[in-house]
Amino acid sequence: MLLCSDHNTGKNIFSTSKIVSSVMKPVFQRIVLFVAVLIALPVKQASAGTGPCDSVTVVKLGGMPAVYSPDSSLYLVNKLDKKGVYQIYVGKRNDSAMQCISLAGPKGKHRSWAKRNKMQVQWHASGKFIICAVEWDNYPELHYAPYKTRLGILQCGIWMDIYAVTPDGKSWHQLVKTERGFTGPAFTPVGNMCAWAEARDTGDLRKDRFGIWRLKIAEFKITDGIPAITAIKDITPPGTNWVEPGNFAPDGVSLLLTADQGMSDARGQDQYILNIKTGEMKNLTNTPNVWDEHGLFSADGSKIVWMSSWPYRSDPNSYRIIGIKTEFMIMNTDGTDQKQLTHFCEKGYPEYGSGIAAVGVWEPDGRSISCITLLFPFYNFFMIRFNGPCGIKGN
C-alpha cells in the first residue's frame, strides 16, 4: 500500500504520542500506528544483465530527477523547501534556475498556503496544468502531532485534495474535495479521463490492513481555461477494499492497479489490469503472501515495472510492515517473464542500505527507469539503466 512515502505512492510513518492517540478518530489512530513502524525498516538495492530489458547499472542520483512537460519546454521538481514543506519548482529546459510556484494560493483559516505540502505532482497531457495533491487546511486528528508523523501520513495521500495549477503558479483550481485523502490520479494518455483511489473514514485495520479505499473514475475537461473533473463514478472492483492506481496503457482502457481483491490480508496485494469499459480484472502476480505494489506500464505498454517482496518470499516477514523487503521487478504485460532488477536488501551490493524499493518510473526512450527508495521519512533517488531500449515496440 502506501507504505506511506513513495509516490504516490507511499511508504511509512511512525509512532504517536498519548496526546495524539487521544484526539485521533480510532481508525486513523490505527493507521498511524500501522504505518509508523516502517521507520525501523532497513533497506537496499542492485543490478545485472545481458538482454535489452536486464538492468546493467544502478546509479544513485543526487536528488529527484526533473519531470519534463509534454512538449519538453519546462520541467518540474517536487522537493522539500528550507522549512521542510514539499513545494513545486518549475524551470525552463536547459536552464538550471527553478522558481517555486507553490508558495501562494487560496487562503486558509488554519494553515497558510506556503505551509501546506504539495505532493503527487505530474504534468497533465495538455501541458497547461500541473496536477498535484495539496494538504488540507486543517485536520484536528493530528493537530498536535510531531511534524514527522504528519508528513508520513500525508505521503500516504491522507488529508490531501486534488488540485490543478498553471505552470507559473498563478492559478490554482481544486478539482476534488476528498473524504479522507487519495492516491493518483492516473490519466489516460490523451488526458480526458482520470482515475484515483479515495480513502474512506471507515474500516478496522485489524481486518482491513490498509483501511477502506474506493476507486473513482471521471472526465477531465478544460473549459475557457478552467480545468474540472466531472461525471465521477465509483468503479471499485468487487471484493476489493485496498486499491491504488498505477497508470493507463496506451489504449486508454487498461488501467494498472494494486489491489487486494478477494484477500484476507491486504499486505499480499497483487498487480492487476482493469478494463475500465468491461470491469474485467486480470491478476498478473497472484501471490497472496508477497507485497506487490506500484506497477507502471512502459511507454508502449508491453512491460511493467513494480516493487515486490518476491525475492524474499522465503522470509515470512518480508511482506509485512515490520520486516518488509522489496526490490524492483519487471515483467511482460501478461505477467510472464518476471525478473528481479535490483537488490536493495542484500548485503554485498553497492546500493545496500539505501531504502526499500518504492516507485519506478519509465523514461520515454525505455533505456532507463527513474526510481525512488524509502528511508522514512525521506527518499533516495536512483536510475536503473538497461542494456538497450526496453518497453519499446520490438524489445
Image (cartoon, rainbow, N blue to C red):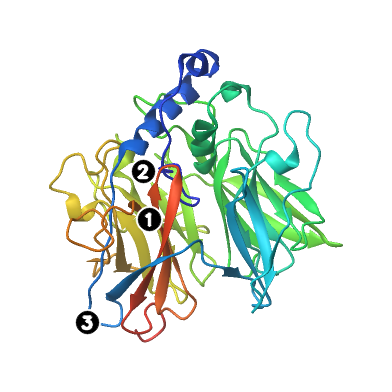
Return the x and y of residue 67 as percentages of the image width and height: 57, 67
Left or right: 238, with 47 as reference point:
right
Nearer the camera: disc 3 or disc 2:
3
Quadrant in the rendering for residue 260: top left
Between 275 and 154, the residue placed more toward the observer is: 154
- The residue shown at (47%, 22%) is 29
Task: Please tell me how crowded label 1 is: few (under 14), some (14-19), or many (20+) other residues with Cα within 10 Å.
Answer: many
Q: How many marks?
A: 3
- Kindly state the secondary structure of the residue where label 2 is placed: loop
Of the residues shown, which amino acid type is indicated by label 3?
Thr
Left or right: 231, with 272 as reference point:
right
Return the x and y of residue 127 as percentages of the image width and height: 70, 69
- Where is mark 3, residue-wise? 50
* Cβ–Cβ under 8 Å for marks 3 and 2: no
Return the x and y of residue 104 as percentages of the image width and height: 78, 48
- The residue shown at (78%, 29%) is 109
* Cβ–Cβ under 8 Å for marks 2 and 1: yes
Q: Is residue 201 above or below residue 57?
A: above
Q: CA distance from mark 3 to mark 2?
A: 36 Å
Query: Residue placed farthest to the left in the image?
Result: 314
- Kindly state the secondary structure of the residue where label 3 is placed: loop
Of the residues shown, which amino acid type is indicated by label 2?
Gln
Which circle's residue, 3 or 2, is located before the other in the chain? 3
